[in-house]
């Protein structure tokens, strides 16, 4: 059975080596003011930093950008975000067959002038975008349907207002007109009920539903008031004309 050699302080070499290795790993990374964890630089701070021209392949597209060699792959993603429209978290940058982390420095990873990097979109972000597109399309469809109902309601509200004015003036309105208008309003209520809406569209749907309810309640009240109005009887005064006297037999032969 092998025994571990102990150092002068009584500790094992294995523990000392592991502790040194852990300290080395901790010293490889540092926190930047922006909160980004990056590799800790060991070069001289006063040394001139060269610029690099990087060739970026994104699918069939090719880009060329210029960055400092001390930049990180996260900064590469920020520049490419303006070029491609992809968010930083939606991008994956591959160099020498390995995906690079945002905090890794270009020069530390061996990136040279005219080096080629490959940019790919995160598959999970593609799925999220597709889901968001479907949600947006659903919202637009709901908004169009609600707007159509709103336009129909505008016309029906005008008719309700006209009937209300007539009844308030004591003019009786045919009951069938009120009943037909109520049925038309209920059709719009059914259309609203069939619309699947969320968020702002849902609020608009509720608002239009309240308009329908208010119009129906108003018509129900007008229907009661209309029943108490007596129909107006229009009479015509006929003029009477005096007939001339009938001529006598002798006057006809004169």
Image (cartoon, rainbow, N blue to C red):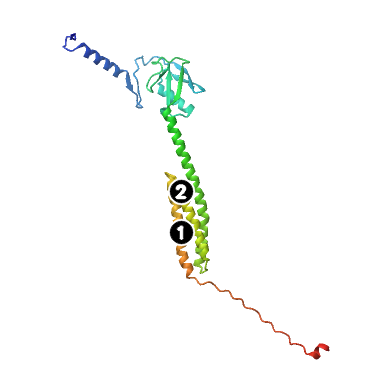
Out of 77 and 145, give the one closest to the viewer. 145
> Which residue is depicted at the point 46% across and 42% down?
139
* Local SS, label 2: helix
Q: Residue at x 43, y 46 (%)?
A: 202
Identify the residue shown where x is 52% and y is 59%: 159
**Mark with earlier residue (1, 2):** 2
Determine whether, in the image, residue 96 is placed left or right of residue 231: left
**222 left or right, relative to 17:** right
Find residue 233 and report its horizontal and vertical position in percent.
Answer: 56, 74
Q: Which of the labelled discs sits on residue 216, or is there none?
A: 1
Q: Position of residue 220 (x, y in %)?
A: 45, 62
Q: In the figure, 146 relative to 229: above or below?
A: above
SS for dot 1: helix
Query: How many numbered marks appear?
Result: 2
In depth, the one of 146 and 76 nearer the eye is 146
Counting other residues with Cα less than 10 Å from the Cα at mark 1, is it few (<14), some (14-19), or many (20 or more)? many
Where, by quadrant of the figure, is residue 201 drawn? top left
In the rendered image of this protein, does residue 250 appear above or below residue 208?
A: below
In the rendered image, residue 229, in percent from the top left (x then y), is placed at 49, 70
The Cα–Cα distance between marks 1 and 2, rounded to whole angstroms, is 19 Å
Which residue is outermost to the right?
A: 254
Q: Residue 10 falls in which quadrant of the image?
A: top left
Q: For mark 2, does the 10 Å Cα neighbourhood hold few (<14), some (14 to 19), or many (20 or more) residues?
A: few
Query: What residue does disc 2 label?
Result: 194
**Quadrant assignment for the N terminus:** top left
- Is disc 1 in contact with disc 2, using a CB cutoff of under 8 Å? no
The mark found on residue 68 in the picture is: none
The quadrant in which the C terminus is found is bottom right
Residue sitting farthest toward the bottom: 250
């Amino acid at each position: 059975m092998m025994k571990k050699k102990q150092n002068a302080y009584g500790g094992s070499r294995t523990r000392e080596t592991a502790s040194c290795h852990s300290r080395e790993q901790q010293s490889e990374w540092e926190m930047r003011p922006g909160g980004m964890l990056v590799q800790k630089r060991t070069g001289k701070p006063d040394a001139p930093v060269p610029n690099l021209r990087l060739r970026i392949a994104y699918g069939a597209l090719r880009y060329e950008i210029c960055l400092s060699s001390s930049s990180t792959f996260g900064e590469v993603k920020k520049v490419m975000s303006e070029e491609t429209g992809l968010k930083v978290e939606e991008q994956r940058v591959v160099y020498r067959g390995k995906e690079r982390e945002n905090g890794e420095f270009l020069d530390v990873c061996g990136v040279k002038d005219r080096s080629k990097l490959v940019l790919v979109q995160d598959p999970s972000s593609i799925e999220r975008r597709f889901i968001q597109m479907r949600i947006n399309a659903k919202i637009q469809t709901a908004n169009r349907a609600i707007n159509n109902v709103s336009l129909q309601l505008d016309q029906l509200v005008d008719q309700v207002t006209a009937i209300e004015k007539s009844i308030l003036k004591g003019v009786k309105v045919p009951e069938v007109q009120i009943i037909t208008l109520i049925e038309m309003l209920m059709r719009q209520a059914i259309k609203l009920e069939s619309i699947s809406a969320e968020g702002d569209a849902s609020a608009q749907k509720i608002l239009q539903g309240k308009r329908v309810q208010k119009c129906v309640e108003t018509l129900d009240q007008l229907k009661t008031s209309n029943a108490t109005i007596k129909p107006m009887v229009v009479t015509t005064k006929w003029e009477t004309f005096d007939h001339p006297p009938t001529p006598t037999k002798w006057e006809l032969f004169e």
